[in-house]
Image (spheres, rainbow, N blue to C red):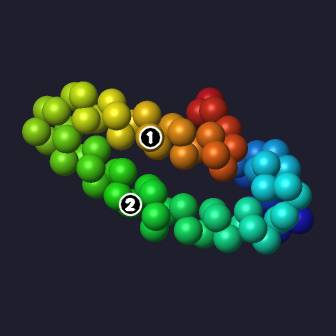
Amino acid sequence: MDQNQNSDVLDWQQGVENFCGDEEMYKGMLAKLEKLTLDEATKKMYEAFTTKNWTEVLANAHSLRGTGGQVIMRKPL
């Protein structure tokens, strides 16, 4: 088991199951996650926050939460 599989953030087993048991596909998706989703959504949320556009902050937070669900991120403690 590598360090990615023993995580307080990700439910590795459930994530792999959600990708039909294809661990390599799951690893590839995780590798792309930051570049494709997190960077852009975080940037948009920051811009909305600095202009006090709370509707946009909420929309981006919702998007990030949905992304987390796709990769089976565990709920924060």
Q: Return the residue found at the far left.
A: 51
Q: Left or right: where does residue 55 sit relative to residue 60?
A: left
The three-letter amino acid code for the residue at tag 1 is Ser
Residue type at numbered disc 2 = Asp
Residue 39 tag number: 2
Question: Where residue 77 sits in the image (x, y, percent)?
Answer: 62, 30
Q: Is residue 6 in sight in this rendering?
A: no
Residue drawn at point x = 67 percent, y = 70 percent = 28
Residue at (73, 62) in percent of width and height: 26
Residue assigned mark 1: 63
Among the 4 quarters of the image, the one containing residue 56: top left
Residue 6: image quadrant is bottom right
Q: In this rendering, is residue 4 above or below 63?
A: below
Separation (CA) of disc 1 from disc 2? 12 Å
Q: Is residue 57 left or right of residue 19?
A: left
Q: Tell me what residue is drawn at x 19 percent, y 48 percent.
A: 47
Could you say whether the residue bearing mark 2 is in a helix, strand or loop? helix
Q: Residue at x 19, y 41 (%)?
A: 48
Who is closer to the viewer here, 72 or 59? 59
Task: Mark 1: give few (<14), some (14-19) or many (20+) Cα within 10 Å.
Answer: some
